[in-house]
Amino acid sequence: MVSSISQRMVLRVVLVAVVLCLLVTSSIAELPRFKHPPKPQQSLNLLVVGDWGRKGTHNQSLVANQMGIVGKKLDIDFVISTGDNFYEDGLKGDDDPAFYESFVDIYTAPSLQKKWYNVLGNHDYRGDVQAQLSPVLNLKDSRWLCLRSFILDGEIVEFFFVDTTPFVDEYFTDPGEHDYDWEGVFPRLPYLSELLKDVNSALAQSKAKWKMVVGHHTINSAGHHGNIEELKHQLVPILEANNVDAYINGHDHCLQHIIEKKSGIHFITSGGGSKAWTGDVKPWNLEEMKLYYDGQGFMSMQITENNADIIFYDVFGNTLHSWSLSKDHNVVASI
Ligand SMILES: [Zn+2]
């Protein structure tokens, strides 16, 4: 009798311990992590393009062609897309032919047959979000990898991809004729606070020499959309507290390099994958603004332990702007 009571008590304690353990584990959500180290003894080389999916129009094919040439020259490891992958309204489903017309059949150069790490933009949220996240696309083209938020671990550098669209109030309060697919985002406030918490803890735990954050939306920009205040207030303090080197985005259809005076963070826009030339550039402090190019193009990065060489290219492959970041002397050299 005594032994059966004590057995029951032990069982109860074990059950409580298991439940507590499960609760603790589930409250520590972690961003999915993918490893993509550089080739042995070499720099990690990559291209960044954004705002591109227009079935080849608006010079998308010309940009793709130059990406192929630069990609070959640098023997790139992968491509980063800063979002707005399919215009105007994302994908209709995982069988939408736009996946072929705007991606598979456009970026055909051998050098671009590498992994593409994609985030979602606001235009992607106007379609079937789940379709872009679906493994079905990966079966159709193994280059494709798209998640809402994740970490790309390149050993010397870590890229933290952040789902920025749900931060923007206007899409919720004044969506106009657009229909956003918020499945998986609602309830919005817990989604955002959990995401910020995950990004903050991932950045704080990172041992990588370089930390770069990738999101679709602009934070500092002289372009059409300009600064997104929601991100300035909620994400920037996390970038500053964790000594992030750069925030890389699309959304404004331009190529832009701003070094924020206060934080020293490089705000880099690579959103020239197709339609550009909006012509509405706002004035900006010239001490901070290193390049504003209103047209199409893309960007390359070559990253080693101590250096990051970054170059913007136009639609003809001409270098528009290049600079190096150094971990040795904390020097920024513009060429
Ligand atoms: Zn956008």
Image: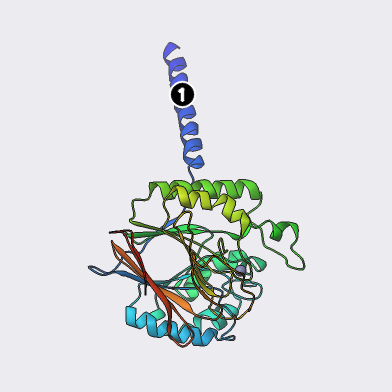
Quadrant assignment for ligand 1: bottom right
**Residue at the outermost left position:** 41
Q: Nearer the viewer, residue 143 or 288?
A: 288
Colouring chosen for the image of the structure = rainbow
Q: Is residue 221 left or right of residue 324?
A: right
Q: Residue sitting at 52 percent across and 53 percent down?
A: 236
Q: Position of residue 130 (x, y in %)?
A: 59, 64
Quadrant assignment for the C terminus: bottom left
**In the figure, residue 122 lies in which quadrant?**
bottom right
Label 1 sits on residue: 13
Q: Is residue 92 left or right of residue 198?
A: right
Q: Position of residue 266 (x, y in %)?
A: 45, 62
Q: Position of residue 275 (x, y in %)?
A: 60, 81
Q: Tag count in the figure?
A: 1
Q: Residues within 10 Å of mark 1 (few under 14, many from 20)?
A: few
Quadrant assignment for the N terminus: top left
Q: Is residue 286 left or right of residue 98?
A: left
Q: Nearer the viewer, residue 139 or 293?
A: 293
Q: Position of residue 120 (x, y in %)?
A: 56, 65
The three-letter code of the residue at mark 1 reads: Val
**In the figure, residue 134 lies in which quadrant?**
bottom right
Task: Give the secondary structure at mark 1.
Answer: helix
